[in-house]
């Protein structure tokens, strides 16, 4: 791979990151940029979790309308989503807490009980975690 191709890929990744940040800015006005960038990273992780979940459901034969919409996307009940609280972002699946992300550090933890992180089960940081590996650790 040439240096020019590597540079183009890097520029494309930067452009995608900027698009995610601007989407978040439209949704959350008056929020500091650092929090918007963190939210964009968490959104990327959640999209990766949804892709991994979708693949697993298809492999196991769960392909009906209880799991997938007509367009092939996951139903609301089968999709991971983000809830923002004072100190943490919660990553939930169908109302059940799966992970918590510290706002100050971006560290991802499993949950002891809803609202309480399990510090012994640090799973990584939103800046460098692979969503498919995180999916296996849930």
Image (tube, rainbow, N blue to C red):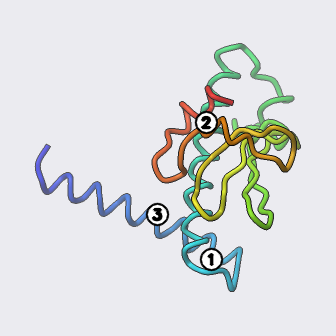
Which residue does the numbered mark 3 point to in the structure image?
17
* Residue that appears at 61% across and 26% down: 136
Quadrant in the rendering for residue 95: top right
Q: Residues within 10 Å of mark 2 (few under 14, many from 20)?
A: some
**Disc 3 and disc 2: Cα gap in Å?**
19 Å
Q: Choose the circle earlier in sequence order: 1 or 2.
A: 1
Mark with earlier residue (3, 1)? 3
**Residue 125 x %, y %:** 53, 49
42 with respect to 100 (left or right): left
**Element at label 3:** helix
Location of mark 2 (residue): 51
Q: Is residue 41 above or below residue 22?
A: above
Query: What residue sits right under mark 1 in the picture?
Result: 25
Local secondary structure at mark 1: helix
Give the residue drawn at x 81%, y 23%.
64
Q: Point out the tag, 3 or 2, that comes first from the N-terminus.
A: 3
How far, Cα to Cα, is label 1 from label 2?
Answer: 24 Å
Residue 45 screen position, x and y as percent? 58, 47
Q: Quadrant of the N terminus?
A: top left
In the picture, the quarter occupied by the C terminus is top right
Please state the horizontal and vertical placement of residue 89, each as a whole percent of the image.
72, 57
What residue lies at 68% left-to-right and 42% top-to-bottom? 119
The numbered dot on residue 123 is none
Name the one closer to the observer, 58 or 35: 35
Q: Dot 3, how many residues are within 10 Å of its Cα: few (below 14), some (14-19), or many (20+)? A: some
Q: Quadrant of residue 103?
A: bottom right
Residue occupying the far front of the picture? 120
Is 63 situated above or below 118?
Answer: above
């Amino acid at each position: 791979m040439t240096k020019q191709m590597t540079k183009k890929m890097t520029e494309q990744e930067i452009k995608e990151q900027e698009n995610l940040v601007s989407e978040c800015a439209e949704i959350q006005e008056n929020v500091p940029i650092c929090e918007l960038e963190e939210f964009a990273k968490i959104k990327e992780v959640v999209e990766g979790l949804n892709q991994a979940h979708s693949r697993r459901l298809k492999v196991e034969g769960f392909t009906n309308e209880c799991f997938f919409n007509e367009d092939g996307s996951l139903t609301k009940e089968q999709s991971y989503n983000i809830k923002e609280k004072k100190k943490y972002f919660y990553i939930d699946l169908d109302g059940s807490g799966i992970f918590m992300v510290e706002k100050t550090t971006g560290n991802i933890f499993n949950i002891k009980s809803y609202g309480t992180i399990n510090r012994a089960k640090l799973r990584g940081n939103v800046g460098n975690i692979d969503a498919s590996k995180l999916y296996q650790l849930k």
